[in-house]
Structure formats: structure tokens, C-alpha cells
Image: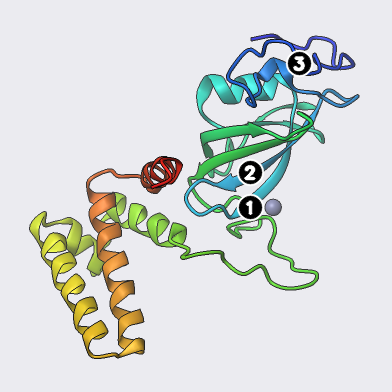
Amino acid sequence: MTRHDDPNTVARTPGPGPRSTAPGSAGPDELRFDERGLVPAIVQDADDGAVLMLGWMDAEALAATLATGEVHFHSRSRAALWRKGETSGNTLALVGLAADCDRDALLVLARPAGPTCHTGERTCFHAPLLEAPAPVGITLAPLFAALRQRFAERPEGSYSARLFADEDRPLKKLIEEAGEVVLAVKNRDHGNLVWEVADVLYHLAVVMVAHGVAPDEVNRELSRRAGERR
Ligand SMILES: [Zn+2]
């Protein structure tokens, strides 16, 4: 890939000519870095789309991100390459990357190893000025994060850890809870239905974590099906 050794050089503006990749997609050498040689990079949680932070990348940080699969930025205060999480351990594993229409901003999809903000908050955007951001859809990322931690550490007394210790138990619970969803529907019991749906999602998440299915793999499959326009 092309290195922008001169940060004042504006990268080739994508024109009507041939692109390096599929139409509508941007190669890293097509980015328009600003006069400091930087592009803003918005980081989104790949599991639920939560906006985690805004950082700045130069060509070096982008290359390091692509080469290592771990998100790197250019630290403006230290004027140096910065691997996110290099001191805190709260790294960001790269899942996807997109440029905006002007090729002067990046959207980074990542899986965080822990809280992204240095304050310990999950996201840097935790100070609402107008209205607290409401989660969109069913927000399962905190559940998956907690389950991955229980799976790795198996804390004593944890219900999830007990489920992880037995292959059959979470599978039986999943079937059982699915049956309870059916009963709640038949009983026209809305409150209980919400409860049982949560139970199914929890036990399904346990099975996914136990067997290494990442939420974004499922998202990708759902997107693929949506693309088939059935
Ligand atoms: Zn922060």
C-alpha cells in the first residue's frame, strides 16, 4: 500500500477512472488526509454499533491497523503512533473499515477488549448534552462481553460459569426457554413473554460464546440474507 510520506499531499481524488477495488469501495491509498496528514476515525462496536470513540489516524496508523488487526491511532499530544490499549490493555480488534463519501473520514468497526474510554466508561460518548443516547435494537454487546469474561475466568458461584462447564446443560436450557416463550405467547402474557425472550437470548448467547460464534458472524449472515431480497 502507498505510504504518504509527505503529509501535505492530498491523496488521489477518486474520479470516474478505475478504482483499486470494487465500485464504491475505497482503497487506503484513496484517502484524503488533512493538512496535518490525519483523518478522523470513528470507532463503532462491531457487535451492536455503539459509538465508542473518535481518534485520528495518519497513514502510518492506518497501515499498522491493517497489518496487525489491532486499531492504531496517531496521538496528537505525543505526535507518535499509538496502539489503542497499549497501556490499559483495552485494545480494539479490527473487524471492518469504511471511508465516508468524501474519503476524508473513517468508520472503524471493532471489538473492544474492555472499556474504550480512559475513564473506565464503555464509550467516550457518555456525557449527553441534549438527551441520553438510547440503545438501538436489542443491545447484546454488554451481555457478550460479560459472558466472554465468565468463559475465560470461570468465577466461582457464577451461573454462566456453571453453564460453560457442561456442554449439554446450556443446550437443554435453550430448548426449555424456547418452550416457555411459546407458552407465554399462548397465555397472552406480555410481561412474561419479554422475560422468556430475554432468557432465550441469554442462553443462546451462552451457546454462541461456548462454541466460538461471534455476534458479527451472525450479523454478516443476516445481512447476506437481507441482500438476497427474499
Ligand atoms: Zn474517553
Q: How is the image coloured?
A: rainbow
Determine which quarter of the picture holds residue 135: bottom right
**Amino acid type for the residue under numbered disc 2:** Val
Q: Residue at x 35, y 87 (%)?
A: 190
Above or below 158: residue 69: above
Of tags 1 and 3, the one toward the viewer is 3
Q: Secondary structure at mark 1?
A: strand
Of tags 2 and 3, the one toward the viewer is 3
The disc at residue 16 is 3
**Amino acid type for the residue under numbered disc 1:** Val
Q: Residues within 10 Å of mark 1 (few under 14, many from 20)?
A: some
Q: Quadrant of the N terminus?
A: top right
> Decide: marks 1, 2 in contact (CB < 8 A)?
yes
Number of on-image labels = 3
Residue furthest out toward the front? 230
What residue did someone put label 1 on?
51
Q: Looking at the image, tell me whether mark 1 or mark 3 is earlier in sequence order.
A: 3
Q: Residue at x 50, y 64 (%)?
A: 137
> In terms of depth relative to the viewer, which is nearer, 88 or 144?
144
Q: Calculate the distance from the C-alpha at mark 2 to the C-alpha at mark 3.
A: 29 Å
Q: Looking at the image, tell me whether mark 2 or mark 3 is earlier in sequence order.
A: 3
Above or below 208: residue 176: below
Above or below 68: residue 47: below
Q: Residue at x 34, y 52 (%)?
A: 148
| Residue 194: image location, x then y, percent | 36, 80
What residue did someone put label 2 on?
43
**Amino acid type for the residue under numbered disc 3:** Pro
Above or below 68: residue 157: below
Q: Secondary structure at mark 2?
A: strand
> Decide: marks 1, 3 in contact (CB < 8 A)?
no
